[in-house]
Amino acid sequence: MAKFVVVGVMNTAVTYVVYVALRALGVGIFAANLAGYVAGVANSFVWSRRWVFRRRTGHIGRQAALFVAGFGLCYGVQWLALRALLVAGVGEYVAQLLAMCVYTGLNFLFNRCLTFR
């Protein structure tokens, strides 16, 4: 779990930096949000496979497909959380960080139980 947290912090930083940078360039909230997650997901797959879950063996194509499917599912839930937080009046950047926490918890469970079991 500690390794997942370390990778999660790295991915959160990548995701958030991309998000903030794109917002500063005038990109819309949801496009910047998606771009940030896409930037973090490639980094996350490599570190999760090699270091967190230590699955250097196994079919990489199957693992990648499940990882991307998990990303899609967790991203969708995160996106709904972000929208709900924004509607509830939570500030944009705080809402983004809170929604990222939702994504991280779900993503760990998905990858632990399905992708890299």
Image: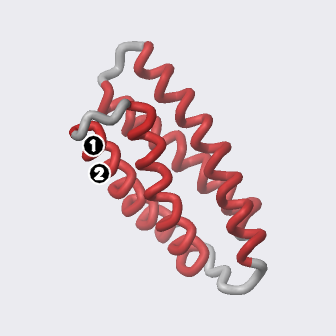
Q: Which mark is residue 20?
A: 1
Quarter of the image with the N terminus is: bottom right
Residue 1 falls left or right of residue 20: right
Residue placed under numbered mark 2 in the picture = 17
Name the side, left or right, on which 67 lies relative to 86: right
Q: Circle 1: is it few (<14), some (14-19), or many (20+) Cα within 10 Å? A: some
What residue is rendered at 47% in x and 67% in y? 43
Front in this rendered view, residue 112 or 92 = 92
Q: Nearer the viewer, residue 105 or 23?
A: 23
Identified at 71% across, 77% down, the residue is: 60
- Alpha-carbon neighbours of circle 2 within 10 Å: few (<14), some, or many (≥20)? some
Most extreme residue toward the top, as rendered? 88
Q: Residue at x 66, y 85 (%)?
A: 56
Q: Amino acid at mark 2?
A: Val
Q: Is residue 86 above or below residue 13?
A: above
Element type at marker 2? helix
Give me the residue at 62% from left, 51% from top.
71
Tag 2–tag 1 contact (CB < 8 Å): yes
Disc 1 element: helix
- Residue 13: x and y in percent read 33, 56
Q: Is residue 88 above or below residue 94?
A: above
Coordinates of residue 38 in the picture (x, y in percent): 49, 53
- Closer to us: 23 or 91: 23
Residue furthest to the bottom? 57
Query: Looking at the picture, how far across and down is residue 111, in whole percent?
Result: 67, 60
Residue type pointed to by label 1 = Val
Above or below 56: residue 2 = above
Describe residue 21's horizontal placement relative to residue 38 as left or right: left
Quadrant containing the C terminus is: bottom right
* Separation (CA) of disc 2 from disc 1: 5 Å
